[in-house]
Image (cartoon, grey):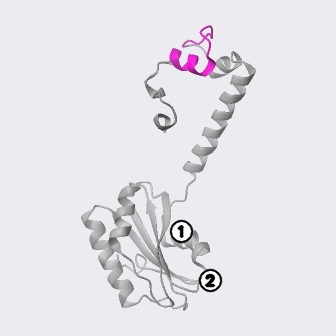
């Protein structure tokens, strides 16, 4: 990210060069015994405020990333997606893309259909998984009718998706069908 924001890759600079970049002064005393607080106290008020603001922003963004949703069960999938899919009048299919720690990278609607079906192209899902470096995927779709049982088409999609994921070494962790107050999980039923 630093390379995208700045012309200089800050990772290649030594500590003295970084101190100069931050302070814009050569007379800042910074050595092995110096603490971060010692360094901050030597900055001008404007630079100090900017440095502390950058640190606060970094801290918040890191905390947000560390607390990203983790998918450890079908209930986690349902909890994440129910607010998005509740009370829909037509079927929608979504994919949840996750990293190695089962943290959500992103969720994406794959298709929007009619009252009883929606078309899903496995290639579209896998392309997106590769683009965001996902190592696992969960499929989610709703049944506006409230019927919790999967259809034959749901079964075919799950098998096709599992086979395609297997070829690319991407794990299909679950396919969850969401209704307004309940859900069906292929993984919980031992079908994945």
Camera-near label (2 vs 1) is: 2
Kindly identify the residue that appears in the image at 40 percent across and 90 percent down: 151
Sequence-first tag of 2 and 1:
1
User: The C terminus appears in which quarter of the rendering?
Assistant: bottom left
Distance CA(mark 2)–CA(mark 1): 19 Å
**Left or right for 98, reference 51:** left
Secondary structure of residue under mark 2: loop
**Left or right for 181, reference 13:** right
- Above/below status of 141 relative to 125: below
Q: Dot 2, how many residues are within 10 Å of its Cα: few (below 14), some (14-19), or many (20+)?
A: some
Kindly identify the residue that appears in the image at 45 percent across and 87 percent down: 117
Kindly identify the residue that appears in the image at 42 percent across and 87 percent down: 150
For mark 2, what is the residue?
87
Q: Which residues are magenta?
A: 16-32
**Where is residue 82 drawn, in percent x and y?**
58, 75
Q: Are the residues at dot 2 and dot 1 in contact (C-beta closer than 8 Å)? A: no
Residue ranking furthest to the right: 45
- Who is closer to the viewer here, 192 or 106? 106
**Where is residue 108 drawn, in percent x and y?**
49, 66
For mark 1, what is the residue?
76
Magenta-span inclusion, residue 102:
no
């Amino acid at each position: 990210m630093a390379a995208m924001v700045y012309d200089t890759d800050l990772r290649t600079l030594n500590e003295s060069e970084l101190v100069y970049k931050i302070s814009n002064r050569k007379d800042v005393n910074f050595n092995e015994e110096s603490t971060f607080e010692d360094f901050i106290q030597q900055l001008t008020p404007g630079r100090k405020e900017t440095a502390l603001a950058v640190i606060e922003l970094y801290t918040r963004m890191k905390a947000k990333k560390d607390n990203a949703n983790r998918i450890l069960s079908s209930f986690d999938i349902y909890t994440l997606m129910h607010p998005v899919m509740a009370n829909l009048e037509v079927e929608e299919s979504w994919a949840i893309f996750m990293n190695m720690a089962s943290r959500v990278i992103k969720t994406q609607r794959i298709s929007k259909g009619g009252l009883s079906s929606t078309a899903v192209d496995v290639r579209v899902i896998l392309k997106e998984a590769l683009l965001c470096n996902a190592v696992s995927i969960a499929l989610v779709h709703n049944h506006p009718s409230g019927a919790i049982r999967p259809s034959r088409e749901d079964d075919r999609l799950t098998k096709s998706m599992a086979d395609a994921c297997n070829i690319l070494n991407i794990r299909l962790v679950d396919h969850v069908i969401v209704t307004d107050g309940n859900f069906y999980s292929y993984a919980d039923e031992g079908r994945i």
